[in-house]
Image (cartoon, helix red, strand yellow):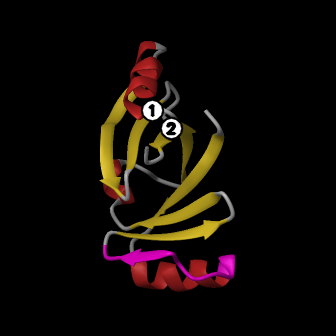
Amino acid sequence: MTGCSLIVFPVSNLKSATKLYRTLLGTEPYVEQDHYVGFRLGELEVGLDPQGHHRGSTGALAYWSVDDAAARLQALVDAGAEKVQDATAIGYGKIIAIAKDADGSMIGLVQAPK
């Protein structure tokens, strides 16, 4: 694991959120689609997800970089976490998975393209 590399904010209005985060971050998005907008700040990606609330996220979700999202998700489940989303390819070669700890905090995992 190399640390947190992605923070995704659930948004209800992608267009207005994109404008706000463009101003906040002082940069243009590297990807701007109907289902996701992403900004790069050095090694950190900041994403806007209009479906985030539907996945149970009530705030920003930090994603930790891992070599194998499926294996790390299983390790977290074995350690007492609840699986929220299986390892899923999301495009651009990335794979994400989501778990929830015993206190309800969401844990995101992201696997970079190989």
Q: Is residue 43 left or right of residue 90?
A: right
In the rendered structure, which segment of residues is drawn in magenta? 24-34
Which quarter of the figure is the C terminus placed in? Answer: top left
Q: Which residue is identified by label 2?
A: 107
Disc 1 element: strand
Label 2 to label 1: alpha-carbon separation = 6 Å
Q: Nearer the viewer, residue 71 or 59?
A: 71
Where 26 sits versus 85, above or below? below
Of marks 2 and 1, which one's residue comes earlier in the chain? 1
Residue depicted at x 35% and y 29%: 83
Q: Nearer the viewer, residue 81 or 112?
A: 112
Residue 70 in picture, x, y percent from top left = 37, 29
Give the residue at the far front of this rendering. Answer: 114
Disc 2 element: strand
Can residue 13 be seen?
Answer: no
Where 3 sits versus 29, above or below? above
Residue 96 in picture, x, y percent from top left = 40, 44
Type of amino acid under label 1: Lys
Can residue 19 be seen?
Answer: yes
Residue depicted at x 51% and y 58%: 8
Type of amino acid under label 2: Ile
Q: Is residue 84 magenta?
A: no
Q: Is residue 33 magenta?
A: yes
**Residue 100: mark in rendering:** 1
